[in-house]
Amino acid sequence: MRITFPNLGSMHIFCKAIAEAAGIPYVLPPPTTERTRELGEFHTNESVCLPLKIILGNFVEALEAGADTIVMVGSGPPCRLGLYDRVIKLTLRDLGYRFRWLTIPGVFNWQAFLQNHDEARHLKHELRPSNYARFPGALLLGWEKMRRCEEMERAAARKRAVAAAPAEVDARLAAGLRELDQARTRRESAAAARRTLEALDRLPETGRRPLRVRMVGEVYTVLEPGINMDIERRLGHLGVEVHRSSYFSTHIRRGSRLDPSVKRERARLLELARPWLKADVGAECNFSVAEAVDAHRSGFDGVVHVYPFSCMPETNAATVLSAVGAELGLPVLGLVLDRQDMGPRLDTLAEAFVDVMRFRREGRMA
Ligand code: SF4
């Protein structure tokens, strides 16, 4: 058995940690490239969401590299993500690939357990007792790495906006993530993160007061720099501190339902969106609107809304967000992402967005 999983930001670091610590062989999907995207586009039709195309491309490349067991996150209706796992599985089978499939449910309940039961029955025979015995520790290591990873990414986003040389922040973060990836224990992970945070702290600053924006939108697009064209880094280099509305751990906490504060937070956000959006549209739509309202109340200078072309929930959110932005006087940069051909255009949009926020802060614009 050789498991694989999709590329999603730094998710490979903790997936790999879990597999290694539990003694389960794995194949990392090669980094997402133009070829990955083209594979996904070639084997689907144009109306399919961009994340599905890229994940499909990731799996084709991982299967070509020797993986035979795919682990995929699931979800529920009304968003199409609820059908991703089935659609991708069928497409890969039609292409002639042979593999096992495990879905990690969006919500952990009995239905989710039954969904995996058949596939897991075969896998059970390939796992040794030592794999089971090591699994709880592996999960803890994976969780630790996820938290440390997010801690470093948050710190880098803050520092990039004020650093005299933002490229040094990128380099230090990349080195820190590599170090974290190589850490074998929770203690080593914590030490790797501490060293990275200290190194970031020591980098010289310009002394300017950074602009602050919140990045909201479709989950995969918010978390995967390969899809959002690294907008967090691009804005950081223009002196903007980017706060993501969610990280991978946010979605795990929401899905596990173990933390009661998650339910309260969800209710609070839905309430914030209610003046503009009375129904729950699904996926992140209501949260995108609510996070924008919350950003305004928390003194942010603007909101970046990222989503893939043809994403139903976020297309709704985009319409509502233009009303929210106009009513609250909050600059909103909407980025609809599909093909990779918008790099220079994105820089122009980002620069104009930064100018608008700066003029507003200086009172030169209503
Ligand atoms: S949120 Fe949008 S992009 Fe993501 S699966 Fe749903 S429709 Fe597709």
Image (spheres, rainbow, N blue to C red):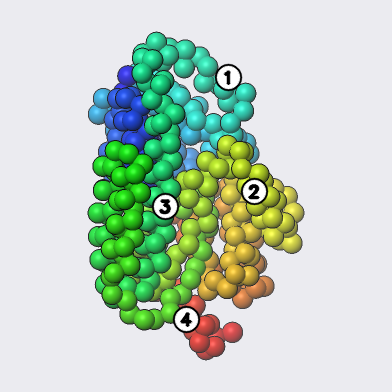
**Dot 4 lies on which element?**
helix
Look at the numbered discs 3 and 4 and tell me whether their residues touch, using CB distance below 8 Å: no
The structure residue drawn at horizontal position 48% and vertical position 71%, both measured from the top left corner, is 212
Specify whether 321 is left or right of 154: right
**Dot 2 crowding, Cα within 10 Å, few <14, some 14–19, many 20+:** few
Q: Which one is earlier in the sequence, the residue at label 1 or at label 4?
A: 1
Residue bearing the label numbered 2? 261
Look at the numbered discs 3 and 1 and tell me whether their residues touch, using CB distance below 8 Å: no
The structure residue drawn at horizontal position 53% and vertical position 38%, both measured from the top left corner, is 81
Look at the numbered discs 2 and 1 and tell me whether their residues touch, using CB distance below 8 Å: no
**Dot 2 lies on which element?**
helix
* Res 7 seen here: no
Q: Which mark is residue 114?
A: 1
Look at the numbered discs 4 and 2 and tell me whether their residues touch, using CB distance below 8 Å: no
Q: Give percent across and percent down for residue 350.
A: 41, 70
Specify whether 295 is left or right of 194: right
Q: Amino acid at mark 2?
A: Ser
**Residue 125: which quarter of the image?**
top left
Q: Which one is earlier in the sequence, the residue at label 3 or at label 1?
A: 1
Specify whether 280 is left or right of 252: right
**Dot 1 crowding, Cα within 10 Å, few <14, some 14–19, many 20+:** few
Residue bearing the label numbered 3? 150
Residue bearing the label numbered 4? 358
The structure residue drawn at horizontal position 52% and vertical position 41%, both measured from the top left corner, is 252
Q: Amino acid at mark 4?
A: Arg
